[in-house]
Amino acid sequence: MSDADVNSAPPPVLDCARVLEFAVLTPAVHFTGRSLLFVDGKELGQVPCLAICEDVRTADILLFHCSRDWGVMGCSAHQSPEEAKVTAESIYRGVSSEWRALNVSREAAEAYLNDLFGGDSWR
């Protein structure tokens, strides 16, 4: 991982979900204009970052659409990380080459959440 990737990497956990892979969307990635992801009754639209995550409690695979500082703006559920990548590519052409693994173990994610919440109240 380059220094640029490290500086733009998300925390190990977003919304109680362990980050598996992330993508910071560069100018080489083309937003197709349709996300088909609705938040508060409006289509979310283009975002600067994506993360494929695994919910720590349920093991569900989630595709998070995020702000530059990794605030989750919208989410969709998928059967696998590969399926999440296919969905992401249909929204952001060229994102396939931008994915980076974060390599966060389940134990590290749980420890992060314990520190964040002062115990295991997040369970």
Image (cartoon, grey):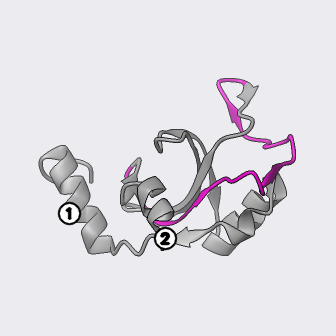
Looking at the picture, how far across and down is residue 41, in whole percent?
Answer: 71, 24
Q: Which residues are magenta?
A: 16-41
**Mark 2: which secondary structure?**
loop
Which residue is denoted by mark 1 in the rendering?
A: 111
**What amino acid is found at the position of numbered circle 2 in the picture?**
Ser
What's the residue at 75%, 35% (across, down)?
45
Front residue of 26 and 49: 26
User: In the picture shown, does residue 102 fall above or below 53?
Assistant: below
Residues packed near mark 1 inside 10 Å, few (<14), some (14 to 19) or many (20 plus): some
Q: Between label 1 and label 2, give the one nearer the viewer.
A: 2
Residue 69: x %, y % from top left:
46, 41
- For the residue pair 117 and 33, the one nearer the viewer reads as 33
Sequence order check, earlier mark of 1 and 2: 2
Q: Amino acid at mark 1?
A: Ala
Residue appearing at x 75%, y 51% in the figure:
27
Where 40 sits versus 45, above or below? above
Q: Quadrant of residue 117?
A: top left
Residue sitting at the far top: 41
Circle 2 sits on which residue?
2
**Residue 26 horizontal side relative to residue 92, left or right:** left
